Image (spheres, rainbow, N blue to C red):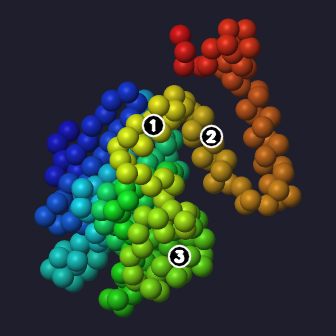
Amino acid sequence: MSHETITVTTAEAVCRIRLNRPAADNAINAQMITEIGEVLARCTSDAVSVIVLEGGAEVFCAGGDFQAVSSSGSAGDPAPLYDLWLTLAQGPFVTIALVHGRVNAGGVGFVAACDIAIAGRSASFGLSELLFGLYPACVLPFLVQRIGRQRAHYLTLMTRPIGAAAAHAAGLVDIVADDPETALRQHLTRLRHLRKPAIAQYKAYLGGITGDPVADRARALDANRAIFADADVIADIRRYVTELKLPWET
């Protein structure tokens, strides 16, 4: 399908979505949200198990489209973007943010919602909303989950971008690399072998636990029992024991 705000390529169970509004610094508008949502919906039902979200060489995403807000006097309904981030966070695939350059405001929401973030050393991350009397209401639930309340609070208050190294120290970025594309390929050598049902079950389980071993005991035991009641799981274990072959090996 043709798109106005993104480009999409799919190969070997990996779908790459590139934000493609360079004249607007890849700012988020309603069309972009719709187009990414359509791609994610297709990926939910097909064989795609890894989604890579990327931007431009200089700007990943500048946040919301201030030009559109200025013209219309409204930012529109925030629900579609929030639900898009929920799909990145909870969908039955591994989501990777591949970041070059500047990330601001809603762009940070995209990164925080992804399972893995890989950044180049020139990347920067900022929340500029309070400078305009706003605050990142929709970004913060995802950002707090990723880096913790106080770090997200400080980043919001300061409105000053932080570099890739600081973002890595805070937990917003998982990998900082001189060559992010090489780092992505290294990750994909493992991630593309993960089975989609297992990803979906794992992410559903992870989203339901609190991190308190006492409170999570019943859920953990139920999940463990369900895993080992799966005939395909047992068959793969037996094959490995008898043939020393991993599930994807012929």
Kindly state the secondary structure of the residue where label 1 is placed: helix
x and y percentages locating residue 114 in the rendered image: 47, 54
Q: Nearer the viewer, mark 2 or mark 1?
A: 1
Q: Residues within 10 Å of mark 1 (few under 14, many from 20)?
A: few
Report whether residue 89 is seen: no
Rendered location of residue 212, percent (x, y):
79, 61
Tell us which disc is closer to us: 3 or 2: 3
Please name the residue that numbered disc 3 is placed on: 152
**Residue type, label 2:** Gln
Viewer-proximal residue among 197 and 77: 197
Quadrant in which the N terminus is drawn? top left
- Which amino acid type corresponds to the residue marked 3 in the rendered image? Ala
Q: Which mark is residue 201?
A: 2
Q: Eyeballing the image, is 55 above or below 136?
A: above
Q: Nearer the viewer, mark 3 or mark 1?
A: 1
Q: What distance separates the C-alpha of mark 2 from that of mark 1?
A: 24 Å
Q: Residue at x 65, y 50 (%)?
A: 206
In this rendering, position of residue 110 left or right of residue 211: left
Kindly identify the residue that appears in the image at 35 percent across and 47 percent down.
Answer: 179
Number of residues whose C-alpha sits closer than 10 Å to that of mark 3, classed few (under 14), some (14–19) or many (20 or more): many
Q: Secondary structure at mark 2?
A: helix
The dot on residue 186 is: 1
| Residue 74 visible in the current orientation | yes
